[in-house]
Image (cartoon, rainbow, N blue to C red):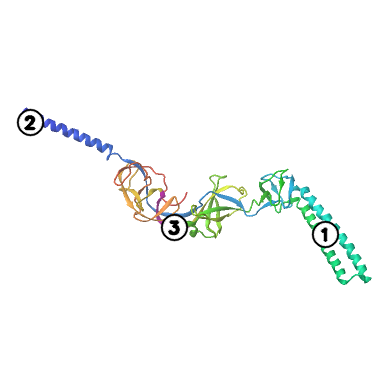
Amino acid sequence: MKPQSRLMKRKWLWLLLVGSAVAAGLWLLGEGKAIPVKVTELKPDELRVIVNATTTSTVKSEIEVTLSAQRTGRVVRLPVREGDRVKAGDIITRLDLSEESVQTQSNLEQSKANFQEAEKNKIRAEALFNKSMIAQQDLDAARRTHEVARAQYHAAMADAEVKQKYSIIRTPFDGVVAQKYTEVGELLLPGSRIVMIVHPEQIYVLATIDEVDLGRLRPDQPVSITVDAFPGEIFQGHVRRISPIVSGGKLETRTADVWVYFNEPQPRIKPGMSADVEILVMVLSNVLSVPSQAIIERDGKKQIYCAAGSALKPGDVSRAVLKPVEIGETNWSFTQITGGLAAGELVITTPEAEGLKDQARIKIEPDETRPSGTDP
């Protein structure tokens, strides 16, 4: 073989080796790099469909009253603090009404003097009439004036008595002082708030529900209630009442209030505490459901990545397959699959994994996501 021919063969062999190395490198860097994903096997199970409040709910008292001043007066006694328990008839506030009483006393004295004068005029008119010294109409006029003066005097006495009663404000029922609006020394006008009294045992949760969920709600539906003050505890309740009015403007979410009552007395839970509610609207049996975060939407279509193959375990390598799906009910955590997937398929629960696309190489990682739509 000629030296030139051997040189050409070595050159081509070298190029082939370099090309193979480059191709292998590209494969390792691109196609050969498996994207770590988590999967869950699709199995028929129970799906509990729930409705959540749009915002944090508040525990309220069924019986509450705000005590207010009925007359102008200065607070001279206020022996309660927020959180104090009170009994029906306890004195909540004592007001000094002297600034208004001056006018009240003046009106009373003036009406009394008018009445006494009218009384004398009536007696005098009757005596003159008996002596035929005045006409019947003059006697009638004196009597009418007397009746008016007497009525005004009685009204002034009643007003003075009522105002005196308004100087002492008592609680109308056994309860707890939920809020105090004033302090000793402040001058109150009629209508000024003093304290709010609530009944601590008769409580409920006032929840705000999005209008799109209202059609699913019915009285007596079971509700799971969690209270921020007692983390980890779940209290059971039920829907008592649904507001017939939807509120909210054009730029706001339209919502309605829902009254949720506890199934059992809860002496530890106090009015004003924050709470969250989950209203159970239906339970679907033997349905396919996936973690809601596994569903992606592209061009208005719902899609899910699945891992090709079966019986895959952590560490195995497979390929991602993007499939269109049809969905049904959801409880935010899990969503029902009504078409596009079959039981036994492995659903990728981390569709946000970097580089994930249809036919991409994937590596299975352990997934702690529950495969069903039930809550723990």
Query: 1 or 205, which lies in front?
Result: 205
Q: Residues within 10 Å of mark 2 (few under 14, many from 20)?
A: few
Residue corresponding to mark 3: 284
Magenta span: predominant SS is: strand
Q: Position of residue 109 (x, y in %)?
A: 84, 54
Residue at the top extreme of this rendering: 3
- Magenta segment range? 282-292
Q: Residue at x 10, y 31 (%)?
A: 8
The residues bearing labels 2 and 1 have C-alpha atoms spaced at a distance of 139 Å
Position of the N terminus by quadrant: top left
**Magenta segment includes 206:** no
Which comes before the other along the chain, label 1 or label 3? 1
Q: Position of residue 244 (x, y in %)?
A: 54, 60
**Magenta segment includes 283:** yes
User: Is residue 140 in sight in this rendering?
Assistant: yes
Question: Left or right: 46 with respect to 28?
Answer: right
Residue corresponding to mark 2: 5
Say which element carries label 1.
helix
Q: Position of residue 7 (x, y in %)?
A: 10, 29
Dot 2 amino acid type: Ser
Q: Point out which mark residue 153 bears.
A: 1
Which comes before the other along the chain, label 2 or label 3? 2
* Numbered disc in front, either 2 or 1: 1
Residue at the left extreme of this rendering: 1
Question: Left or right: 229 with respect to 299?
Answer: right
Say which element carries label 3.
strand
User: Is residue 91 in sight in this rendering?
Assistant: no
Q: How many marks?
A: 3
* Numbered disc in front, either 2 or 3: 2
Q: Residues within 10 Å of mark 3 (few under 14, many from 20)?
A: some
Dot 1 amino acid type: Tyr
Dot 3 amino acid type: Leu
